[in-house]
Image: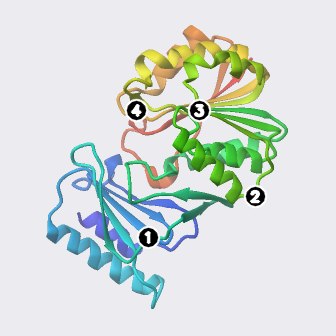
Amino acid sequence: MQALLNAIAQMPLSEDAQRVFHGRGGMYPGCEQWSLDWFAPVWVLTSFKPVSDQELAACHSALQARWETLAPGQPLNWVFQSRVTGEAETRLMAGSVPEPHVVSEQGARYLVHVMRGQNHGLFLDMAHGREWLKNHAKHENVLNLFAYTCAFSVVALQGGAAQVVNLDMSQGALAIGQQNHRLNDLLPKARFLGHDIFKTWGKINKMGPYGVIVVDPPSYQKGSFVATKDYIKLIRRLPDLLEPQGHVLLCLNAPELDTQFLHTQVTEAAPSLRFVERLANPAAFGDIDPEKSLKVLHYQDA
């Protein structure tokens, strides 16, 4: 775990939430199990393999030493999450976690919850996707599918979107999304629909057409969405929902599925969409095999 300890010893202090160490990308042999995130004012260390008390003690010592340099006199707050079984077991290791816990990214504020669940309310690897949308949303009608806590909606409205339609099956996630909109003092131009997307096409159509559509589904969520069989159903609907020259972001975070998976499905189900570019992931999420990392593909209606 020396690479992790080295990263801690050198890490800067940032106002924005961000990934500090990404062992999962395979760039640091022997440290594949580790990730470290900064959700100010809390560090969140995650391991996907069993960890000894000695290893946790070494991490604590490294964090404490670096924190004394970065923020002298301030308490160290850090959380450890074990993801060994696929379930999340989370422990507060030092200090405290604010409640409510609000973090920032590129001028936007988001409510997060690092002490429960696998997902903390903001996916840090999607930072460039949010930046892209903020730059492409002006005057647009935006459709945000699988909206989760509606971070895409927040940045779209900050970028001047005319309206955002957020759709997600989780009413709880959408409720946090509504809080995120209030945190950012946004005008009431967003709608929040807690529905199954595959049973809501009529309502989605009525609120269209859309200048930008963001599709960011889970890769596998039993009873809700399985990328290998359900993604093409979404793609098939896109041309009818888009304005002429409209934009689409297709997102996929499944290591076993590559960019060609999406290209093939678009060619088959929506051949009018033209591939523009794959958005780069944040540098902190470097991966020895980019095809196993997050894929965010930009298409445009021809």
Q: Are marks 4 and 3 in contact (CB under 8 Å)?
A: no
Which of the two discs, 4 and 1, sits closer to the camera? 1
Left or right relative to 178: residue 87: left
Position above or below: 158 against 133: below
Instruction: Name the residue type under label 1.
Output: Val
Which of the two discs, 4 and 2, sits closer to the camera? 2
Residue sitting farthest toward the bottom: 73
Which of the two discs, 3 and 1, sits closer to the camera? 3
Instruction: Name the residue type under label 3.
Output: Gly
Q: Position of residue 108 (x, y in %)?
A: 67, 58
Seen from the viewer's position, the closer of residues 81 and 194 is 194
The residue lying at 71 percent from left, 28 percent from top is 247
Q: Are marks 2 and 3 in contact (CB under 8 Å)?
A: no
What is the distance, in whole Å, between disc 4 and disc 3 at their CAs?
24 Å
Say which label, 4 or 3, has the lower sequence index: 3
Say which label, 3 or 1, has the lower sequence index: 1
What is the distance, in whole Å, between disc 2 and disc 1 at their CAs?
24 Å
Say which label, 2 or 3, has the lower sequence index: 2
Q: Which mark is residue 97?
A: 1
SS under mark 4: loop
Q: Which residue position holds label 2? A: 185
Seen from the viewer's position, the closer of residues 20 and 73 is 73
Q: Are marks 2 and 1 in contact (CB under 8 Å)?
A: no
Q: Residues within 10 Å of mark 3 (few under 14, many from 20)?
A: some
What is the distance, in whole Å, between disc 4 and disc 1 at their CAs?
31 Å
